[in-house]
């Protein structure tokens, strides 16, 4: 059993899970303008679906506004429709040259609901990290049963796996707290 390979795979899997969690959180509206709110919008343009970032530049002129300037002005209508279809709470305004989206202020009740949603997402991610840990520990125990490693090595590897898991769970907690704080800011 190659211990270094096992640990590097574990780190890779946990890092990927943490990155996916960060990306998922970036799409949650906080009451502040963010390009991530429109990143995954696809627009039908000349019969093909294209990501918004291929058709326009997205800028954030202030904390409450998203400005979308298409390369081709003829695509304005399609972009506007795609934004409305993607998120009905976003209200795009078309001035003939660009699209402006004003981000409405979140109510206290809505902020609390979003934080509950984030808590659930956090718990789900921690469970995913524990599942990754379990798979690694199963590989270690299997190698021990097959006499590929001795009991001491198995114990040390399982301890290292647990330490890595704990550090990634701690990172998830930090990311979650930062997002919750961001949402509760007025």
Image (cartoon, rainbow, N blue to C red):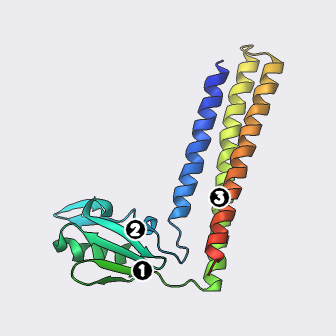
Q: Is residue 153 left or right of residue 69?
A: right
Residue found at x 83% / y 20%:
152
Whichever of labels 2 and 3 marks the residue nearer the N terminus, that label is 2
Residue in view at x 47 percent, y 80 percent: 64
Could you say whether the residue bearing mark 3 is in a helix, strand or loop?
Answer: helix
The residue shown at (67%, 70%) is 181
Residue position for label 2 = 38
Q: Is 25 on the left or on the right of 61, as rendered? A: right
Q: Which mark is residue 175?
A: 3
Question: Can you give x and y, in whole percent of width and height, for residue 115 in the image?
Answer: 66, 72
Asked whether 143 or 93 is in front, the reply is 93
Q: How far apart are labels 1 and 2 at the CA level?
A: 10 Å
Q: Give the structural element (helix, strand or loop) at label 2.
A: loop
Instruction: Give percent across and percent down for residue 8.
Output: 61, 30
How far is the residue under mark 3 from the one under mark 1?
A: 25 Å
Left or right: residue 119 versus residue 49 is right
Position above or below: 130 against 138: below
Specify few, some or many for label 1: CA neighbours under 10 Å numbering under 14, 14-19, or 20 or more: some
The quarter of the picture where the C terminus appears is bottom right
Mark 2–mark 3 Cα distance, whole angstroms, equals: 21 Å
For label 1, the SS is: loop
């Amino acid at each position: 059993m190659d211990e270094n390979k096992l640990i590097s795979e574990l780190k890779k899997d946990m890092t990927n899970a943490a990155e996916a969690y960060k990306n998922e959180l970036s799409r949650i509206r906080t009451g502040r303008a963010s390009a991530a709110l429109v990143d995954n919008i696809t627009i039908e343009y000349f019969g093909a679906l294209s990501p918004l970032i291929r058709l326009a530049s997205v800028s954030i002129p202030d904390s409450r506004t998203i400005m979308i300037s298409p390369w081709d002005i003829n695509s304005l209508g399609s972009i506007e429709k795609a934004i409305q279809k993607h998120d009905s709470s976003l209200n795009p305004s078309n001035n003939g040259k660009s699209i402006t989206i004003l981000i409405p202020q979140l109510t206290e009740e809505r902020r609390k609901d979003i934080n509950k949603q984030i808590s659930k997402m956090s718990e789900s991610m921690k469970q995913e990290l524990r599942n990754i840990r379990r798979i690694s520990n199963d590989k270690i125990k299997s190698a021990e049963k097959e006499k590929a490693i001795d009991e001491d090595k198995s114990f040390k590897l399982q301890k290292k796996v647990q330490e890595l898991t704990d550090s990634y769970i701690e990172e998830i907690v930090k990311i979650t707290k930062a997002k919750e704080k961001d949402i509760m800011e007025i």
